Image (cartoon, rainbow, N blue to C red):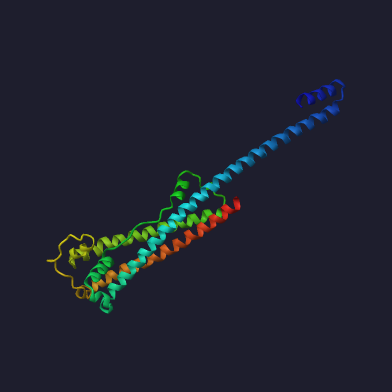
Amino acid sequence: MIKFFRKIRQNLVSENKFSKYLIYAIGEIILVVIGILIALQINNWNENLKQDKEEITILENLKKNLILAKNQSDSLISYEKRLIKDIITVINYESNNLLINKDSTRAVTFKNALWNLDSHLLVVNAYEDLKNTNKLELIKNQGLKEKFTSLEINLIELKIMLDDRLNFQQIRMDNIAENDINFIPFLKSSFPTIDISNEKSNDYSKILSNQRIRNLLGIKLFMTKDILISKENLDREIKDLISLIEMEVKKKK
């Protein structure tokens, strides 16, 4: 092909047909430019195809990670609900026949309300990896990225709430365990070999008539309720993100 065009060019020059040669030369330049543009377009198309495949892989990894986070979220929400139930049961001690009639249930429920706490935070490792490797920009859906940013902000806010409750537990609630009750009998459920036969029994009616203790349980209940609401909101965000990712992947395949 190159020899063919060279021959035409030589014939035009030898015949002194300059105007035709000029037109030919311009046409040849245009063909070269068109060829370059086509090559660039093909290269861009291949690059976009490569990025699309990488984006789909990223989205699918995010979805898997979010499904794990959703399962973890369900477990954490259930834990907070049980804790709220136990605290309310203890605060309502005088009207709760179950606690009055069964010493073992009474001890376990009081211990749970006083002592139990969960400070685990949801972790979305795939999103953190994207941020750390600067690959977040591969996700082209701006709305999806904004949803992840919102999730990250809400996780930070939840961590602050969890830390506040943990500090309250360590400073105020643990003081009850140390000074206002006999904590040893509570160990029996976790350590069956411990002998508590000579331990002084806890008088829960007397303990829960102490307004300071009731107030501290009430504060813990209030903080736990706020944490539960935050965790439930995060759970809905995760569910929405999974749906958005599924739609995005389906659109790109």
Quadrant housing the N terminus? top right
Q: Residue at x 44, y 58 (%)?
A: 70
Q: Position of residue 240 (x, y in %)?
A: 51, 60
Give x and y (percent) for residue 194: 17, 60
**Quadrant of residue 28 in the image?**
top right
* Rendered position, 183 above or below 24: below
- Which residue does the image show at 15% across and 64% down from the upper left? 196
Task: Name which residue lies at 51% across and 50% down.
Answer: 60
Q: Please say if 44 is above or below 182.
A: above
Evaluate whether residue 143 shows in this view: no
In the image, 65: left or right of 246?
left
Vertical placement of 18 versus 119: above or below? above
Residue at left offset 39%, top offset 65%: 228
Question: Would you say 151 lies left or right of 223 here?
Answer: right
Q: Position of residue 129 (x, y in %)?
A: 45, 46
User: In the rendered image, is residue 80 in sight?
Assistant: yes
Apparent side of residue 188 relative to residue 8 in the rendered image (left or right) = left
Total numbered badges shown on the rendered structure: 0
In the picture shown, does residue 129 fall above or below 166? Answer: above
Question: Which quadrant holds residue 89?
Answer: bottom left
Residue lying at the far bottom of the rendered structure: 95
Q: Residue furthest left?
A: 198
Residue 214 place in picture, x, y as percent? 26, 72
